[in-house]
Image (spheres, rainbow, N blue to C red):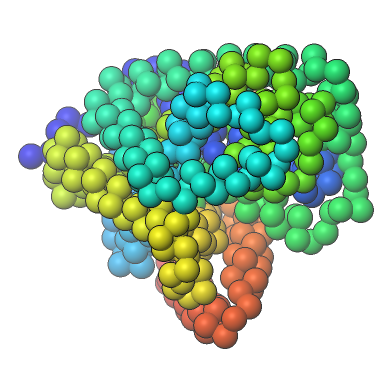
Amino acid sequence: MSEQREHWKSKAGFILAAAGSAIGLGNIWKFPYIAGENGGAAFIFIYLICIALIGLPVLIAEVLLGRSTQRNPVGAFKKLSGKPFWIMIGSMGVIAGFVILSFYTVIAGWSIGYIVEALKGSFSQFSDPGISSSYFEELTGNVNWIVGYHTLFSILTMWVVYAGINKGIEQGSKIMMPVLFFLLVLLVIRGITLPGAEKGLAFLWSPDWSKISGQSVLIALGHAFFTISLGMGAMMTYGSYLSEKDNIPSASLQIVFLDTFIALLAGVAIFTAVFAMGQDPASGPGLIFVTLPVVFAKMPGGVIWAVLFFLLLTLAALTSAISLLEVVVAYFVDERKWKRHKAVMVFGFVVFLVGIPSALSFNVMKDVHFFGKTWFDNADYLASNILLPGGGLFISIFVGWIWGFDKVLIDLKKGSESLFTKYPMIIQAWRIFLRYLSPVMIMIVFLHSVGLLESAMHQLRTSWVMISLVCGLLYLFIQSRKK
Ligand code: PFF
């Protein structure tokens, strides 16, 4: 028998848990370096537009789908449509949760490993990025190190989800999120008080429009999706534990605000320190695991700051990982009537196993390529470039066109009647964004990211994705005409 469905004890609990899902490696590791590489403030400006015009409307749609159906992504589409196509879209979300978690725990594991390295004083010998880089390669090249921390992080994730919505995810987020915020504020203060910090701020805040291209707009939009955990039903699943008295638009706005604010603070903390210590700000993905340890080595009290920083990164990753596992668990609890504990143990373990080849992609399986990429890169590619934008596209189409806008409005107004009476324009704008702007923009990102493939194998895959996409859209169009 299925267990009684839990609900968030408070609105703050939901907002912190959802913000916890949104704030993760994407904010602290990825956002600073992509902003740094794409013109600083100019990129941030474009990113903010993407968040406001696409991220927020799609987030409201996802949370609403969850709350209205009180189900996981598969159950939600089953309840509202019942058509195999839509059930498949829901399943894609569950699969995306599975795939993202399998490689997310590997990177998050490095973060725990770096706390230990910092405590051991390993960073003190990093007089230049070359040394730091070889040390990083040595660590990730060690199977025991990488699989060991992947295991540890997976167990932590399972532990929180095992405890349930209230005692695990809600309680955990209520503790971890304020700690995360506090650590970040400390790091920002440390960063901006270092001599030379102003160069870092100037780098981040002076727009360099010459670096903005079509490509940067696409990166901004793609990142907007990943960072708000959109397109795979994580927010839908969290929304399914909401009650009807909660105001979805206002909660969504707060989640988006927190996510953006934390990303900006992370940018400030990192770039002020990087510039003050004379390091290269455009070191790309290696910024956190290669450049920052050098920065800490040069900073007074660097050991403490390094520990705090990697603790912050671990907490951010943990509150995101639990939302990924929860999507898979909710599916088995709702649809297969499994007990939560059994679902967590079984699928936590399966995700852990699927993550092992991702961990090995940095050492023994480095040269084992499928479709021209390592296992890790394939998992990342599949989730970030195909499953998430695909999911986001269809969620916008479903809520904008298929569900029936009258029904959508009745549900959306629950808990937010006064907002819509005061500002009726909001509904019109939301409808337009969901119906036209989001699908078109997401489709552009989707085709672009698929179009980046270069090899013949990839070309083939491109055609298949495009053909399936066109068929899917045609099908949708015919369905909507039938109504
Ligand atoms: N939003 C997370 C980050 O920025 O790191 C990543 C993520 C978590 C994506 C949960 C999707 C998801 F469902």
Residue at 56% from the left image edge and 20% from the top image edge: 308
**Quadrant in the picture for the N terminus:** top left
Q: Where in the figure is residue 111, as x and y percent of width and height?
A: 49, 34
In which quadrant of the rendered image does the C terminus lie? bottom left
Image location (x, y in percent) of residue 26: 58, 41
Count of marks overlaid on the render: 0
Q: Looking at the image, is 3 positioned above or below residue 351?
A: above
Check the image and name the residue furthest to the front: 125
Q: Is residue 322 visible?
A: yes
Residue beneath the point at 34% across and 64% down = 88
- Residue 102: x and y in percent read 38, 50
Task: Give the answer, above or below, for where 85 lies relative to 195.
Answer: below
Question: Quick check: can you spot residue 327?
Answer: no
Looking at the image, is 317 positioned above or below residue 197? below
Q: Please give the name of the residue rendered at 62% of the width and 66% of the height, measured from the top-left corner.
A: 449
Which quadrant of the view contains residue 30?
Answer: top right
* Residue 401 drawn at (x, y percent): 51, 59
Q: 344 or 36: which is nearer to us?
A: 36
- At a point 60% along the width and 29% down the height, the residue shown is 123
Q: Residue at the far left: name it.
A: 1
| Residue 271 lies in quadrant | top right
